[in-house]
Amino acid sequence: MAQRKYRLTDRLIMALDGLLRADAPEASGADVPSPAVAIADSVLAGKANAESARLMRVNHTGEICAQALYLAQASLARAETTRQMLENAAQEERTHLRWCAQRLEELQASPSHLNGVWFAGAYVLGLASAAAGDSVSLGFLEETEKQVVAHLDEHLGKLPVADRKSRAILLQMRRDEARHASRAASMGARALPAPVRGLMRLQAMVMKTVASRI
């Protein structure tokens, strides 16, 4: 079956739809309960609650970016297997997004006010990587997920010890992200040049710094 050719207006509509779905995580992945659902919530002191909220706000924004990235990549995927892999990954990221949103609500915290900006930027990056071909697109996904795993390890080390609910969520997310990276590698992901990997780390650092505050 020939792949449908999308015009720019089609892609803009798809991006808007993706943002709306990403910003309403309760409508996605509802059949996958949060890893924290059976864990009793601990009462966190003021500073501990604020730190957990800050970290989970960043992770919520990260899942917004993952939505944009994978939706954009899937829209330009050449092979059906690549498109399906990206769409499956996006579905899991929507589930992660719902978990993070639920945890933010429990912590009485709000998500980043700039999530629309983060979504738009990640969508453009996704289109750019996918335009270079499936192997580059998969390489971008693999490197992204490797950096996300390192980021989650950092956050797991910073979480207040008493916040067992957030920890359970991040541990499951870490397992899923590592699996995405391994899957991309097995499908022929092309290793990205060092300058590109460095630029990705810089962009992620800016996002994490700003999203944690605004």
Image (tube, rainbow, N blue to C red):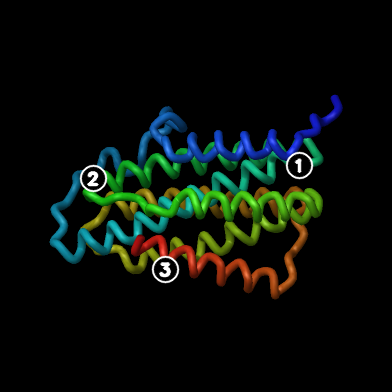
Please state which of residues 65 and 151 is positioned toward the viewer in this rendering. 65
Closer mark to the observer between disc 2 and disc 3? 3
Identified at 72% across, 55% down, the residue is 129
Cα separation, mark 2 vs mark 3, equals: 22 Å
Identified at 61% across, 49% down, the residue is 123
Identified at 47% across, 64% down, the residue is 151
Position of 141 with respect to 213 (left or right) is right
* Image vertical order of residue 158 relative to residue 41, above or below: below
Please state which of residues 48 and 58 is positioned toward the viewer in this rendering. 58
**Image position, residue 61 (x, y; %):** 44, 53
Residue for badge 1: 77
* Crowd rating for badge 2 (residues with CA inside 10 Å; few <14, some 14–19, many 20+): few
Disc on the earlier residue, 2 or 3: 2
* Crowd rating for badge 3 (residues with CA inside 10 Å; few <14, some 14–19, many 20+): few
Q: Secondary structure at mark 2?
A: helix
Q: Are marks 3 and 1 in contact (CB under 8 Å)?
A: no
Disc on the earlier residue, 2 or 1: 1
Residue for badge 2: 106
Please state which of residues 154 and 198 is positioned toward the viewer in this rendering. 198
Residue 171 visible in the picture = no
* Image vertical order of residue 14 relative to residue 121, above or below: above
Cα separation, mark 3 vs mark 1, equals: 31 Å
Q: Are marks 2 and 1 in contact (CB under 8 Å)?
A: no
